[in-house]
Amino acid sequence: MKDMINKKIERLKNLIPVNSLIGFYPSSGTNIKAFDFSKLPLDYVICSDYNIKEEKIGKIITFKGDNNLCLRVIIESGIKLDAIFAVQDGAIQGGNHEYVNSVGFLGRLLPALKNTFVLVSNIRNYFSFDRGPITQVEYEGIGIYRQAIYSTYDLDVNNYEIKCFNINNVAPHSINITGEKKIRIFRKSIWQDQTKLDAIFKGTRDRGTGDEKIALMEYWPSSYMHDKLFNIFDLTKQGSIIPLLNFCNEKKLNTIGLVPFVAGACVDRRYNRIVRTGYLQLHEEYRDWNEVYPKEIILYHFDSNDFAELYAL
């Protein structure tokens, strides 16, 4: 796996000069000859799909692999993206098994994006990007992006939303805890702090199929270590974090990062009530925790609806 990833990183470095203007088309499909990006203000467009042949045709550079693997290679190649083409929904295409217009996928995109970027999305697809820490801004080049051909099945540019966004720099929210213990909430990607955290607790997305391409933990994040990423669902039964706190104390983990407990899970009303209670319970249980570790809990999220109860404290 490591050798394969390193070869892909070296390939992108060789094909794309430093300071190039880059677009990323996750779950692009394989019929790239139908695309026309010639008029776009971009030097290259990286198209990723699990079944695509790797080649370079004009501005298009294809990447064989799912979107998360492609993102890892983009980041480790030092590439910053100017545009995202979230035209295919991504639920099946590209081996991604998640919507590329979702706020969750935005979380993994953020470390690869420039502070200002263009998003091309199909209005027919699921969309929750705008619930993330981004703000729409005016951009005079929107019309140019409507002169491209992005799909073989939907050629009508009126079915596309083309917007420009800035990434927000949101100040962390601190919650008062007795003693030396701290809770902070960041509205940014947990992967941006991966080297600073002693442990990351999130849904691993390994669905038990044995299929490597849909197991996010196989190749993300860039400095991923098997003893650093843990499944949050296993350690937060019924919304309680006591099992997680015990785990951290046993392993002497100082600073830990968590995402919302429902990340990656289907939510019904009953479960949602349990989890909402759990966020307040997290504060109470950590406040009353008398062991040495962990010394700091950092909560990471994108969706503006996450951790509302904790922000109110």
Image: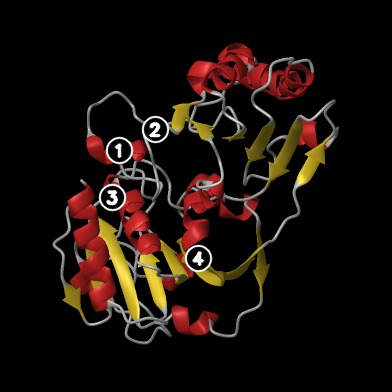
- Which residue is tagged 3? 66
Q: Name the residue located 64 percent from the left edge and 26 percent from the top edge.
A: 294
Q: Could you tell me the amino acid type at mark 4? A: Leu
Residue 294 falls left or right of residue 103: right
Q: CA distance from mark 1 to mark 2?
A: 7 Å
Residue 254 falls left or right of residue 31: right
Q: Could you tell me the amino acid type at mark 1? A: Ile
Local secondary structure at mark 1? helix
Q: Position of residue 274 (x, y in %)?
A: 66, 16
Q: Which mark is residue 205?
A: 2
- Which residue is tagged 1? 214
- Which residue is tagged 4? 113
User: CB of mark 3 within 8 Å of CB of mark 1?
Assistant: yes
Q: CA distance from mark 2 to mark 4?
A: 23 Å
Q: CA distance from mark 3 to mark 1?
A: 8 Å
The answer to which of marks 3 and 2 sits earlier in the sequence is: 3
- Total labels: the figure holds 4
The answer to which of marks 4 and 1 sits earlier in the sequence is: 4
Q: CA distance from mark 3 to mark 2?
A: 14 Å
The answer to which of marks 1 and 2 sits earlier in the sequence is: 2
The answer to whether residue 4 is above or below residue 309 is: below
User: CB of mark 4 within 8 Å of CB of mark 3?
Assistant: no
